[in-house]
DNA sequence: GGGGTAAATACTTGCCT
DNA sequence: AGGCAAGTATTTACCCC
């Protein structure tokens, strides 16, 4: 009697895996979700909606005041803000292509030759390295996909950091940049506890679902990523807001899922399918009009699956009541 | 609209070599 | 290591009420 196990794809499903990130006793003001602290970045995000609660303790932006009397232009002591999503963290300089000095005067032949050599070296230091070019392209991909899926900034940053680690661990040779970039982004959303379905990533990526999953598994294993098994309740806020159901129904959906989890009725079933069914069942119970077709399309789960799961959820819930 | 079903497909696991 | 078979979940494409 074998079963499809959606909760075992990180190879080591243990209770202790869930404690990698410190769990705060706070809850999100927006959606009441669990708040996850990311100590390494001085950030706290909501596990449900990805909302950033505590922005960085360190301000990496320029300082918008002058330090010398009469110096009205030089209001910045630092360069551009650093970010994970620039291949050199935004710290590079550029040497212009024009053969003119800062005042616009043309340069002598000797100086021109020297500038040419400088450019050559500048070029070599900055982008010659295959790894750097690799990062550049991957970060572009990550940013593009994240925009398409409307993912929060911290998620993008995490994805960038993961990808960088993958490159540094030399995981890339023999694998496609897009595949690994997509996998990094997927892993990031899982780590932040606001998961999206793999198919969503495959839709906005040039790689197919299969490749994404393969790359994801590889990434997770090689980097020793501790990622919690997918929890159906994590999908509830997403689906609920897309379908515009009441808070009451949303709460009920969570309860249905909690009961199902306690009864072990969820093992082997797809988390998104369960969440979709719970929303549908809850909407029915609170007399809200919600068609299976509507839920099916936002959750990316077939009507058949919703029907099957929602009957099960109701059965388990009813058996539990007495 | 909901609900049912059969065949096709996807994914996992265990077994084998 | 990788191929293969078996078992389960999910989707697809019909159907009826």
Image (cartoon, coloured by chain):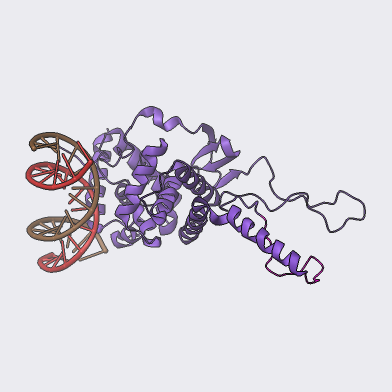
Chain colours: A purple, B brown, C red
Query: Residue A9, percent across and down?
Result: 31, 40
B14, above or below A75, in the image = above
* Outermost residue to the right: A69
A87, above or below A23, in the image = below
- Which portion, as a residue range, is magenta? A93-107
The residue closer to the viewer here, C4 or A66, is: C4
Residue A225 seen from this side: no
Query: Quarter holding the C terminus of chain A?
Result: top left
* Outermost residue to the front: A110
The residue closer to the viewer here, A101 or A54, is: A101
- Tell me what residue is drawn at x 33 percent, y 41 percent: A257
Q: Is residue A293 magenta?
A: no
State which quadrant residue A12 falls in.
top left
Q: Main secondary structure of the magenta part?
A: loop
- Tell me what residue is drawn at x 42 percent, y 38 percent: A223
Q: Is residue A99 magenta?
A: yes
Query: Residue A190, percent across and down?
Result: 42, 44
């Amino acid at each position: 009697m074998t079963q499809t196990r959606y909760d075992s794809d990180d190879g080591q499903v243990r209770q202790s895996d869930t404690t990698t990130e410190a769990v705060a006793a706070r809850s999100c003001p927006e959606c009441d979700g669990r708040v996850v602290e990311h100590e390494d970045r001085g950030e706290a995000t909501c596990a449900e909606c990805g909302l950033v609660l505590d922005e960085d303790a360190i301000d990496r932006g320029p300082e918008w005041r002058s330090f010398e009397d009469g110096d009205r232009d030089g209001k910045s002591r630092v360069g551009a803000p650093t970010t994970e999503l620039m291949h050199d963290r935004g710290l590079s300089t550029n040497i212009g292509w024009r053969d003119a000095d800062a005042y616009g005067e043309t340069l002598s032949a000797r100086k021109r030759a020297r500038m040419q050599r400088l450019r050559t070296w500048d070029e070599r230091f900055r982008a010659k390295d295959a790894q750097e070019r690799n990062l550049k392209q991957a970060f572009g991909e990550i940013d593009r996909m994240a925009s398409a899926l409307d993912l929060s900034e911290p998620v993008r940053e995490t994805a960038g950091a993961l990808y960088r680690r993958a490159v540094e661990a030399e995981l890339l040779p023999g694998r496609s940049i897009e595949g690994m970039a997509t996998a990094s982004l997927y892993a990031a959303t899982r780590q932040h506890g606001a998961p999206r379905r793999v198919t969503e990533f495959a839709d906005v990526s040039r790689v197919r679902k299969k490749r994404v999953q393969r790359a994801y598994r590889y990434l997770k294993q090689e980097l020793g990523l501790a990622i919690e098994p997918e929890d159906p309740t994590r999908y509830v806020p997403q689906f609920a807001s897309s379908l515009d159901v009441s808070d009451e129904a949303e709460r009920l959906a969570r309860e249905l899922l909690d009961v199902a989890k306690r009864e072990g009725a969820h093992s082997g079933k797809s988390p998104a399918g369960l969440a979709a069914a719970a929303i549908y069942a809850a909407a029915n119970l609170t007399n809200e009009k919600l068609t299976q077709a509507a839920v099916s399309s936002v959750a990316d789960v077939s009507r058949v699956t919703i029907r099957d799961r929602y009957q099960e959820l109701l059965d388990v819930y009813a058996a539990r009541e007495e």
